[in-house]
Image (cartoon, helix red, strand yellow):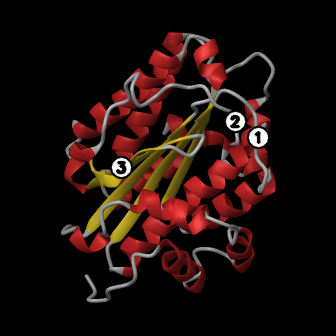
């Protein structure tokens, strides 16, 4: 581990990611929008300087909280799915090397990056889906936070690997700043490091071609789940993600194998 002590400022970390080639110059220009640094900062949580292990797996989820979730009667299924991911990670042998961050699609933060015992379960009090679907805008913010946290650990000489999930039951409807191509640019940059798994889950709403939506956003097809809208199918999709996250957390070789295999790997 190096003795370098970088700034924990989100802006400084994203600049470091650009300087080291994690983010391209085009991506760096794209994310220079009002308030992005502040919103990324809110997600950073536990400083890398407080972490004592030589490697870390950074798990992050962004769960849809649009009104259509509630209208389809799936609010509790979302809570149960998120909580299953937490339980699976807490049961992993590698749980001491995992930090987790939970975010909602409309920008709310369930908990910033921190140890598993600091993560909170979803309840009716902290998850009430009644908003819109700013999928592109929030994907850029969410993955910018992933990039910043990854860079924070990398700058400290800690081997960081990231597993991230974006879940929605609809296509973008309410973004104002970003398009699918912006998401694609950011995802492509992160995947080139070979230290990121970026997964997507699109719950069938009867009209959206989620394979196409996620392809346009830059997701690899093997890391896309498209469950039907039944409780059973949604819960199975969350289980598939949790199993993949656990496998990926078990060291560099396990991460590489999981990343190459997708949800079937």
Q: Of helix, strand and loop, which one carries label 3?
A: strand
* Label disc, if present, on residue 174 of the rendered structure: 1
* Residue 251, visible in the rendered structure: yes
Asked if marks 1 and 2 touch (Cβ < 8 Å), the reply is yes
Residue placed at 70% from the left, 51% from the top?
137
Which callout, 1 or 2, points at the residue further toward the start of the chain? 2
Q: Residues within 10 Å of mark 2 (few under 14, many from 20)?
A: many
Residue placed at 72% from the left, 18% from the top?
205
Q: Of helix, strand and loop, which one carries label 1?
A: loop
Residue placed at 52% from the left, 34% from the top?
264
Horizontal side of 47 relative to 144 (left or right) equals: left
Separation of residues labelled 1 and 2 (CA atoms): 6 Å
Q: Residues within 10 Å of mark 3 (few under 14, many from 20)?
A: many
Which callout, 3 or 2, points at the residue further toward the start of the chain? 3
Separation of residues labelled 3 and 2 (CA atoms): 23 Å
- Does residue 225 lie above or below 142 as drawn? above
Which callout, 1 or 3, points at the residue further toward the start of the chain? 3
Residue placed at 67% from the left, 62% from the top?
186
* Label disc, if present, on residue 113 of the rendered structure: none
Residue 32, image x, y percentages: 69, 72
Provide the residue designation for mark 3: 100
**Number of residue marks:** 3
Q: Nearer the viewer, residue 133 or 168?
A: 133
* Label disc, if present, on residue 133 of the rendered structure: 2
- Does residue 6 lie above or below 90 as drawn? below
Asked if marks 3 and 2 touch (Cβ < 8 Å), the reply is no
């Amino acid at each position: 581990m190096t003795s370098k002590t970088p700034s924990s400022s989100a802006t400084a970390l994203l600049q470091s990611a650009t300087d080291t080639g994690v983010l391209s110059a085009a991506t760096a220009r794209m994310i220079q929008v009002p308030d992005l640094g502040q919103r990324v900062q809110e997600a950073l949580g536990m400083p890398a300087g407080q972490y004592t292990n030589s490697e870390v797996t950074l798990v992050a989820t962004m769960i849809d909280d649009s009104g259509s979730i509630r209208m389809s009667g799936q609010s509790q299924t979302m809570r149960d799915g998120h909580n299953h991911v937490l339980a699976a990670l807490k049961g992993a042998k590698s749980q001491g090397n995992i930090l987790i961050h939970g975010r909602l699609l409309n920008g709310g933060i369930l908990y910033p990056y921190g140890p598993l015992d600091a993560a909170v379960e979803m309840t009716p009090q902290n998850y009430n889906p009644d908003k819109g679907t700013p999928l592109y805008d929030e994907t850029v913010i969410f993955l910018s936070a992933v990039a910043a946290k990854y860079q924070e650990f990398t700058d400290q000489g800690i081997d960081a690997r990231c597993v991230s999930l974006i879940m929605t039951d609809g296509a973008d409807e309410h973004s104002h700043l970003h398009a699918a191509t912006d998401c694609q640019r950011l995802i492509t940059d992160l995947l080139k490091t070979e230290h990121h798994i970026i997964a997507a889950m699109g719950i069938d709403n009867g009209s959206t071609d989620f394979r196409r939506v996620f392809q346009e956003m830059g997701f690899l097809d093997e890391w896309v789940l498209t469950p039907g809208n039944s409780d059973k199918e949604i819960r199975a999709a969350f289980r598939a993600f949790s199993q993949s996250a656990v496998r990926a957390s078990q060291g560099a070789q396990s991460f590489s194998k999981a990343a190459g295999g997708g949800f079937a790997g």
